[in-house]
Amino acid sequence: MSFAIVTFGCRVNQADSRALEARLRGRWGDPIAPESADLVIVNTCAVTADAERSARQLIRHVARANPRVRIVATGCYATRDQNALAEMPDVTEVWPNTQKDRLLEDDDVAARIPDPGTGARTVLFVRVQTGCAERCAYCGIPGTRGRPRSLAPDTVVSAVSEAAGRGYREVVLTGVHLGAYGRDLRPASSLLELVRSLEAAANPLRLRLSSIEPMDCSQALIEGIAESRQFVPHLHLPLQHGSDAVLTRMRRQYSAESWLGQVREIRRRMPDASIGTDLIVGFPGESPTEFEATLDLVKRAELSYLHPFRYSDRPGTDASSMPDKVPAAVVRRRLTALREVGDQLRRRFASTQVGQVRDAITLRDPTVVLTDNFLKVRIPAGPAPNEQVAVRVTSADPLTGTLVQL
């Protein structure tokens, strides 16, 4: 029996897929190409209509190339619209997230962790939380991921210790609403307490947080990351929009200026930190003035990169029934403008790192390293994948560097 896993969407989905893969390896060995496998698990995403369309296209492609394949669809699209996937003639089974989670939410840490180098991977994503109780007007994820659920702190510490023992150099903690970590536990915990527990465990690897909602990014958490010996100087703080009026329509629980204050505090405490954000373009009713507010805010913030997305109606969300949808051509122009600003910010941040020596890890292509502050730097050939090295950044565009002996 042979298998393959194809993943769409967020780092939580990527973490889920790696955990599923680790379990299947114990039975069937290494995964192979989907076009040749007996079983293909498609871990879908439902955050946009484009993500769902991509999953359907992939399923049809695999079935054409491999007519005898058994295709199992899982993930958020398989949860949001189980019937749509079940009715596809090429899909053998549909596992909603509840079924997938039953395979993953236990205390068998070792069974969920593939060895480093598996699929040429050098960074491990560990899902410490799933589910969301927030009700953002545009998002259908609470309906596909369910109520917030957190792994127990000792389970997370064990997972990170297991990863370190197997030779990983970096672990990324992921969650659907990572900042809500621990609130559902009894006794209750918090992401800050988890950060402190992992710091106290002193495992010999780097730790990174995937994404923190602004309402969860406390002063204490910023200080905890800044003072940490293991957590790297990188925070992803989703803004979604630079207009307070749009944030209110989105039902986001912060203001544009409070988000900017957090960014500036992170930069004050960690001058070389990488700071990124997510932005939605074309939310219903978005006026030219409101879009300009987003452009203005991200230009004022000392960001390192942007992840802009076009707004997509999600069935059952409040935003899907809002009037004044923005024409597609207008959304495309605004998205282009925001991407251009993102490119400028990325180059500007990279230029501040020229001459700096950064801790880095070689990736699957060992001529590319990932620095602690989230830069992918090209270096001369020599190291193997998954080596921890020191790199001096020598050029910002293109991003290049040289190895340094410490």
Image (spheres, rainbow, N blue to C red):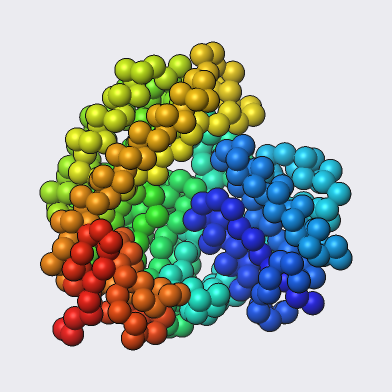
Q: Residue at x 47, y 31 (%)?
A: 332
Q: Is residue 332 left or right of residue 288?
A: right
Q: Is residue 122 left or right of residue 200?
A: right
Q: Between 234 and 111, which is closer to the camera in this rendering? A: 234
- Residue 384 falls in which quadrant of the image? bottom left
20 and 184: which one is in front?
20
How many marks can you see? 0
* Rendered location of residue 42, percent (x, y): 69, 57
Q: Is residue 234 above or below residue 366?
A: above
Q: Quadrant of residue 216?
A: top left
Residue 119: tell me if it is visible.
Answer: yes
Determine the image quadrant of residue 24: bottom right
Answer above or below: position of 9 versus 255.
below
Residue drawn 71% across the image and 61% down it: 41
One can see residue 358 in this view: no
> Is 302 above or below relative to 201?
above
Q: As displayed, is residue 339 above or below residue 160?
A: above
Residue sitting at x 53%, y 61% = 15
Residue 270, given in percent of the width and then of the height, sits at: 17, 55
Furthest-top residue in view? 323
Pick the front one: 340 or 286: 340
* Coordinates of residue 201 in the picture (x, y in percent): 32, 73
- Residue 404 in percent (x, y) is at 19, 81
Q: Residue at x 54, y 13 (%)?
A: 323
Q: Quadrant of the N terminus?
A: bottom right
Quarter of the figure with the C terminus:
bottom left
